[in-house]
Image (cartoon, grey):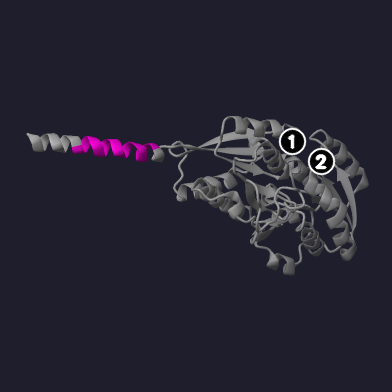
């Protein structure tokens, strides 16, 4: 009888000791996703990559992680308010897309870890981190080098359309990366290529029709579309105008080419989202943001849509096609 009592007591003790471990395993970490655009504008394929990589690292939605989504719906002035909401509900980490979202998050909390992604300008110059190697504070992540690749994108465009002389630049003046690209990067590249660039401001969705009407009269020879949430959210409309006008166009992301744009040169965003998931995993497992250097992209992709080229009457030189990572036929 005494042995039975001893076994029962031992079992009860072991069961009690197991509760803290079980409670720890059952903790659900909340990840705040802060974006300047609308849900329908985000590429589901890229988010699927992000979620899949998290699952591979042992994180399952509803089991040990949960997502809190905050979308600015194309109104970046709302980002500080949305960042404050994520801080109030005490998320464990904030994933901020774009420089404006990253700045809003950084200015709202000094304690909650922040992973920035989709930042097209130098995050040091933007005031996000102290240096790439040693970010400092509570923020780290990835830069797209979107501004730095603008000159290369213009160079590829000139090679693909050798006769082009005059290129219109569609950009959002409220986007810091767009502004830097238009004011400093593209003029230097254009002079070296013998191109004349004509910047056209688009401050909101309602501006596109006005700009398109002006372009229909002006008849430029090429269209260079800057990045950012405003251009991305109206991407299909821009592509549709370029196709209707038989206007060669270049973009900073693959999705625009899939939608009918002529070409794009950009960071491999699949790799970008996959690496962002790795940083989220490391932080949730205890690594501090200052110990994770800000990473620059290592993979780029050059994509051409030959179907679009034929539709608008453009012949892309064979040597340019040979350099493309992907040709849509």
Q: Is residue 73 visible in the rendered structure shown here?
A: no
Q: Nearer the viewer, residue 172 or 265?
A: 172
- Quadrant for residue 203, please give it: top right
- Residue 308 lies, with reference to residue 78, above or below; the image says below
Determine if the magenta segment contains residue 16: yes
Q: Secondary structure at mark 2?
A: loop
How far from the left and from the top, in percent, is residue 128?
A: 71, 48
* Residue drawn at 77 percent across, 47 percent down: 243
Mark 1: few, some, or many residues within 10 Å (few <14, many ≥20)?
many
Magenta residues, dominant SS class = helix
- Quadrant for residue 295, please give it: bottom right
* Residue drawn at 36 percent across, 38 percent down: 20
Q: Nearer the viewer, residue 126 or 247?
A: 126
Label 2 close to label 1 by CB (< 8 Å):
yes
What is the span of residues highlighted in magenta in the rendered image? Answer: 10-23
How far from the left and from the top, in percent, is residue 103?
A: 71, 42
Find disc 2 in the rendering and name its residue.
174
How far from the left and from the top, in percent, is residue 162?
A: 84, 64
Q: Secondary structure at mark 1?
A: helix
How far from the left and from the top, in percent, is residue 85?
A: 63, 30
Whole-angstrom CA distance, mark 2 to mark 1, is: 9 Å
- Dot 2 or dot 1, earlier in sequence: 1
Q: Nearer the viewer, residue 224 or 162?
A: 224
- Residue 265 lies, with reference to residue 228, above or below; the image says below
Work out which quarter of the rendered image holds the N terminus and state it: top left
Mark 2: few, some, or many residues within 10 Å (few <14, many ≥20)?
some
**Quick one: which residue is furthest to the left in this view?**
1
Find disc 1 in the rendering and name its residue.
76
């Amino acid at each position: 009888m005494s042995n039975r009592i001893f076994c029962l007591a031992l079992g009860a003790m072991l069961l009690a000791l197991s509760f803290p471990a079980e409670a720890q395993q059952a903790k659900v970490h909340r990840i705040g996703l802060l974006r300047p655009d609308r849900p329908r504008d985000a590429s589901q394929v890229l988010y699927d990559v992000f979620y899949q990589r998290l699952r591979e690292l042992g994180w399952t939605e509803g089991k040990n992680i949960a997502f809190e989504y905050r979308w600015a719906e194309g109104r970046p002035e709302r980002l500080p308010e949305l960042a404050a909401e994520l801080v109030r509900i005490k998320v464990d980490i904030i994933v901020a897309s774009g420089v404006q979202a990253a700045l809003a998050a950084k200015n709202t909390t000094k304690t909650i870890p922040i992973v920035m992604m989709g930042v097209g300008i130098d995050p040091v110059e933007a005031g996000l981190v102290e240096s790439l190697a040693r970010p400092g504070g509570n923020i780290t992540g990835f830069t797209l080098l979107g501004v730095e690749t603008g000159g290369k994108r213009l160079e590829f465009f000139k090679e693909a359309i050798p006769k082009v002389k005059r290129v219109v630049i569609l950009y959002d003046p409220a986007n810091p990366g767009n502004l830097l690209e238009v004011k400093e990067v593209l003029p230097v590249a254009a002079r070296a290529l013998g191109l004349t660039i004509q910047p056209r401001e688009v401050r909101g969705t309602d501006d596109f029709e006005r700009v398109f009407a002006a372009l229909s009269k002006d008849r430029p020879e090429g269209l260079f579309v800057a990045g950012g949430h405003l251009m991305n959210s109206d991407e299909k409309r821009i592509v549709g105008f370029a196709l209707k006008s038989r206007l060669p166009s270049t973009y900073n992301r693959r999705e625009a080419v899939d939608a009918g744009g002529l070409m794009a040169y950009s960071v491999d965003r699949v790799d970008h989202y996959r690496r962002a998931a790795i940083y989220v995993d490391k932080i949730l497992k205890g690594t501090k943001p200052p110990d994770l250097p800000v990473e620059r992209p290592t993979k780029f992709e050059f994509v051409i849509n030959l179907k679009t080229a034929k539709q608008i009457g453009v012949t892309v030189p064979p040597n340019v096609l040979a350099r493309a990572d992907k040709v849509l036929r």
